[in-house]
Image (spheres, helix red, strand yellow):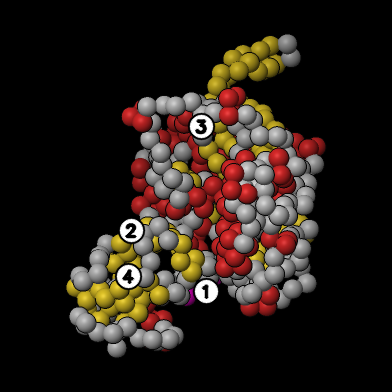
Amino acid sequence: MAHILIMPRQGNTVESCIIGEWKVKEGDTVSADTPVCVVETDKATFEVPAGAAGTVLKIFHPAGDDVPVLQSIMAIGKPGEELPAGEQPSAVLSAEMPLPDTPSAPGTLSPDTPPFIPAAVPVPGAAPSVGLSAAGDGRAASPRAKNLAREEAVDLRSLGGSGPGGRIIAADVAAAAAGRPPLTEAARDEIRRRIAAGLPAGVAGPGSGIGGRITLANTGGAPAVSSAAGEVPVVPSGDYTDAPIKGIRKIIAGQMMDSHNTTAAFTLNTAAPVLRLQELRARFKASDPSLGLSTITVNDLVLFAVSRVLPDYPYMNAHKLNGVVRTFKPVHLGCAVATPRGLMVPVIRNADKLRLIQISQKARELAEACRNGTVSPDDLRGSTFTVTNLGNTGVESFTPIINIPEVSILGVCGIQPKPAEVSPGSYEILPHLGLSLTIDHAVVDGAPAAEFLKAVHAAIRDIDMWIAK
């Protein structure tokens, strides 16, 4: 019987993966260990082995497809062998990539412990179900359904679910999109805006556009711009290139829009004097390598300061979950890492209990794993507060996007010379590190957020004293 390779589950909350690349084609001969494709989640990339020796009989999904976990992606067997009919053989489950089975340390986040919060959280009062998210009216929708609804401008509130327990699945969204008149792009954008604002988004009957298309005017938005005024200028084809937004970039874009549409983002900026921090960093760099201090960076020192301040401000170390704010005792610190595939946020567990050198080592290990594609999915979830650093670009301030369901994120900017009072009436030009704190104003008010930022400012200014505590 042919061996059916399935899409492996990459972590306990992953519902689907994107096939980034096929390394083999139909007719190729493979061994059990042959990597046949590269699959991607929104955070990491993995190679999938064949799981059996033989000939590639059939590839069920092309590169670029977003495939649910445990669904068939390839058949391997003898040349000319017929594919099995009906359900997949239970033996194919052995192709699933193993997950760590080591018990979590006390206080860490794991899928089986109360502090763990999946990326999508069940509606209060419903039975817990990993990977479900609210459709907006108390029912649940799968992440794939949400992504498709956003892309097609379909209002989930108007749908019935055909999935288990009435869950709205991608097929429900696709059917709704296929059963209505086509939309112009302007109408699609307006419907998305109205859905995000909680306004009615349905348009009955055919539209007024060509072929019955629904136009912006049919949605109640502003009238369409006349072609004379709004026509896109003709550009010679050799002067530009078009690249579709797809794969991981599309998933990241969806997550950024989710954050934008579901948080009342509000950013505060300040600058902390870092003369002592720079002097300490210089001493670390010049120290004996055997001490392990020479690789400590400015970002490591900021992460240390944040990890020590957060326990005193628990409302910043929190998640917003369907009308509930959950605060955490341990600090599970997310540290944003830029990679060729996009932004990743690995997590330093229990950072408030780690020494500076331990935070530095863990941050470096996680960043390297993200960049080379070996990071574990379990290291990319469960953060309670995130720090993102653009300091090496010279940026003086910016507005970080909140890593939902967190309620705040700290942006670290470049070091700039600024005047500072060193004694009453006496000023000097000293180096200052820019800090940009974005909060969800629906959860945290400006004054408490400013108190937290002031405390981080002071900890960075006096970092040598905080290390000595």
**The stretch drawn in magenta includes residue 103:** yes
Distance between mark 1 and mark 3 Cα atoms: 37 Å
Task: Give, as a single range, the part of the protein colored magenta.
Answer: 101-105
Q: Is residue 319 visible?
A: no
Depth check, mark 2 against mark 4: the one in front is 4
State whether residue 352 is above or below residue 133. Answer: above
Mark 3 belongs to which amino acid?
A: Gly
Q: Secondary structure at mark 4?
A: strand
Precedes in sequence: disc 2 or disc 3: 2
- Is residue 93 inside the magenta stretch? no
Q: On screen, 124 above or below 237? A: below
User: Of 402 and 409, which appears nearest the observer?
Assistant: 402
Can you name the residue that lies furthest to the front here? Answer: 211
- The CA span between labels 4 and 1 is 37 Å
Which of the two discs, 3 and 4, sits closer to the camera? 4
Query: Viewed as shown, does residue 295 lie left or right of 103?
Result: left
Quadrant where the N terminus is found in the figure: bottom left
Q: Amino acid at mark 2?
A: Glu
Name the spot of residue 59 as percent of width and height, x first: 32, 70
Q: Which mark is residue 391?
A: 3
